[in-house]
Amino acid sequence: MTLANPFAGTAETGMVEHMNADHAKAIAHYVALAGLPAQVPAQLVGIDGEGMHLRIGQAIYWLPFEKPCNTPVEVRQALVSLAHAQAWPTVGQVEA
């Protein structure tokens, strides 16, 4: 099921521009945590309630947040938490 992006429009644009302008180190940390290619710097290109999209070269990667975010404040908390994380959090995985 595809969910509507609660941040589509100016809220998402503002978050993306802020992260790319002021938090390149945090974005590089997300890349390292997720084990993504690090040959070229990543750029944040999208944020939705479930995670973020990063562009690395010509490829786009989606990284999930630990839990869904419904407000820009929750997104900020998720991004700050990930910037300080030592490993990418597991996302709602249920053991069979």
Image: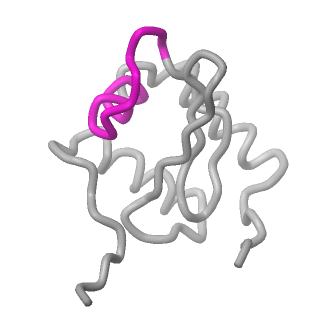
Q: Quadrant of the C terminus?
A: bottom left
Q: Quadrant of residue 16?
A: top right
* The magenta segment: 27-41
Give the quarter of the image for residue 36.
top left
Location of the N terminus (image quadrant): bottom right
The reply to whether the magenta stretch includes residue 3 is no
Confirm whether the magenta stretch covers residue 40: yes
* Residue appearing at x 22%, y 41% in the figure: 84
Q: Residue at x 66, y 33 (%)?
A: 45
Q: Is residue 17 above or below residue 57?
A: below
Residue 1, above or below 21:
below
In the rendered view, does 23 fall on the left or right side of 25?
Answer: right
Answer left or right for 36 relative to 96.
right
Question: What residue is shown at x 62% (from left), y 27% (from top)?
Answer: 59
What is the residue that sits farthest to the front in this orientation?
A: 96
Q: In the image, what residue occupies the spot 37% across and 64% down?
A: 66
> Closest to the observer: 57 or 75?
57
Q: Residue furthest left?
A: 86
Residue 92 lies, in percent from the top left, at 35, 76
Residue 51 screen position, x and y as percent: 53, 55
Q: Quadrant of residue 78?
A: bottom left
